Each structure stands twice: as C-alpha cells, then as structure tokens.
Amino acid sequence: MSGPGAVFERLDVHRAPGDGPVAFGAELGADVLLAAYGRGLFPMPADDYASAFNEARFEEAVAAGEVALLPGGDDDPYALAWWSPDPRPVIAPDGVRVGSRLARRLRNGLRWRTSADRAFPQVLAACAEGRQPPWLTARLRSSLLELRERGAAHSAEVWEGEELIGGVFGVSAGPVLSLDSMFHRRADAGRVAVADLAARFAAAGGRLLDAQWDTPHVRTLGAGLVPRERYLAELAAPADVGPLATEVLPAARLG
C-alpha cells in the first residue's frame, strides 16, 4: 500500500483495544486524517501533560505490541493518540432527538435559522475555545480546514439574527459523518445544529452519524451503542453521498 493510508496498513482495527488508544504517532496532515476516519479512527492530540500520562500509562502496552506505534510524526509519538471505541455510539440521521420542549419552542416563535458549511472556521474556533484538555490543536484545526476545502468536513450553524449561537462540525467518510465537537451560546442551540446537520447529511445520501464517545449527552441526542465490527462494516459499505445543501433555513422545520 502507498499513499496516506500506508501509515495504518499494519494496524488491525478489528482486533485493537476498544477501551483505550489503538495507536500513537503519525503525522496529523489532512490526508492521514481522512484516511484514519475511513478506517474508523479519530485523533486525540495531547498537550505535554497528557502526553506524559499516555507514555506512563501505555508504554508497556506499546512495547508488548498491544497498542501500535505508527511511523511518522514528531519526536513524541505519545502526543497523538488514535482511538476506535468498542462499542461505538451512533445515531441514525433521522434519529436525532430534539425533545418535545425544544420542538414546541421552535414551532412557537423561536426565530433561529440554520445553515451548513457557511461558517466552518468560526464553528471550529468556538469549539476549541476554553476546552480542556486542548485537543483541537492548531495542527488539527489546519488539517480540518483543509478537509473542509475538499468537501470532506462539514459544519452546521445556528443563527439568531446575525449572531452565531451554536454549531457542530465533523468529518465525512463514505456513508458516515463523524461528529467531532459542538458548541452553544444559547441553550439547545448545539442540539439544533446536530439535528440540522443530520437532516442535510441524510438528504445528501448519508446513512449514519458517529458520536465517537459514549456520554450521557450523546445518549440524549439519540445515540445508541453498536459493536465496533458493525460500525466498521457500515463505514465500508458502498455509498453515494453528494454535497450538502448549504442554504439558510428556518430552524422551525426541525421542531
């Protein structure tokens, strides 16, 4: 194998740990990032503290070959971890839960509007703001911006007048859109962003949303757990996903 996916050619994700990092290392360029998502992996860059923790916690597993050490990258491979949780939290594009209270608000005069791929850099910056640990590093943001230019990363935005009050972004790979992060400046604006992006992805031919981490919050959005083997099969299925519609629409349609 040659090309950006070559860094993962010896990595058997099917047999990799499901409750810890699958691998460390590699270079976090756009090509490698897209190849990783296509194999069911997502990155977690680490600051100095988290990198030192990774090394102390997992160096024996790396030495035993239980966690892979990938070629490329900088002098500190533990500064970049790759994850592929098992089981995996996923959401059907038509299965995002808005909730009855929010649905009523949307129908009864909450004048929010939504768009897609119109403010990706702003959504990315808002998602990075104040987050600890700071996993949305400058290098990762640069690669995500490049993927947006290629049409492989997407955002949904929620607007109140001219103010951006919520958003979500993720990376698409085949029939799957992997949701990386979301933010809100008004209660429920992030939930509306997820519902909007899901609707647009479904209309473009997408079949599954990947929530990455199983948390109480993603469960409230409608996520359910599936075995990683099933997730990888869905990811590898043939797909014909077109471009997302980007027009500004009333959020009331999601209620």
Image: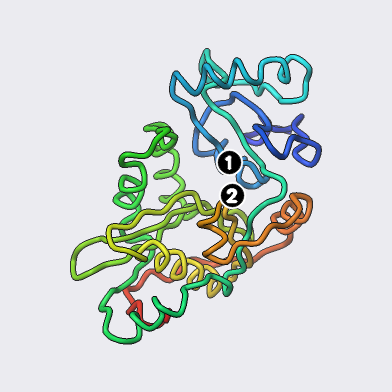
**Residue type indicated by callout 2:** Gln
Closest to the observer, 35 or 251? 251
Quick one: label 1 or label 2, which is nearer the N terminus?
A: 1
Q: Secondary structure at mark 2?
A: loop
Residue 59 percent coordinates (x, y): 67, 16
- Quadrant where the N terminus lies? top right
Residue beneath label 2, please? Answer: 212
Q: Nearer the viewer, mark 1 or mark 2?
A: 2
Where 222 falls versus 109 (above or below)?
A: above
Which quadrant of the figure has residue 169? bottom left
Q: Position of residue 250 (x, y in %)?
A: 32, 79
The residue sitting at the bottom extreme is: 108
Position in image of residue 128 (x %, y %)? 35, 42
Residue 161 horizontal side relative to residue 79, left or right: left
Q: Secondary structure at mark 1?
A: strand
Q: Which residue is more in the foreground, 217 or 123?
A: 217
Which residue is painted at 40% across and 65% down in the image?
193
Asked which quadrant contains residue 125, the reply is top left
Q: Residues within 10 Å of mark 1 (few under 14, many from 20)?
A: many
Question: What residue is drawn where x is 25% and y is 78%?
Answer: 111
Hey, which quadrant is residue 238 in on the image?
bottom right
The amino acid on which the numbered mark 1 sits, given as a three-letter code, is Phe
> Which numbered tag is attached to residue 148?
none
> In the current view of this chain or complex, which residue is farthest to the right?
15
Residue 42 is marked as 1
Question: Could you tell me which quadrant the C terminus lies in?
Answer: bottom left
**Residue neighbourhood size for the residue with mark 2, other residues' Cα within 10 Å, grouped as few (<14), some (14–19), many (≥20):** many
Mark 1 touches mark 2? (CB < 8 Å): yes
In the rendered view, would you say 160 is above or below 68? below
Q: Residue at x 57, y 70 (%)?
A: 93
Give me the C-alpha separation between circle 1 and circle 2. 8 Å
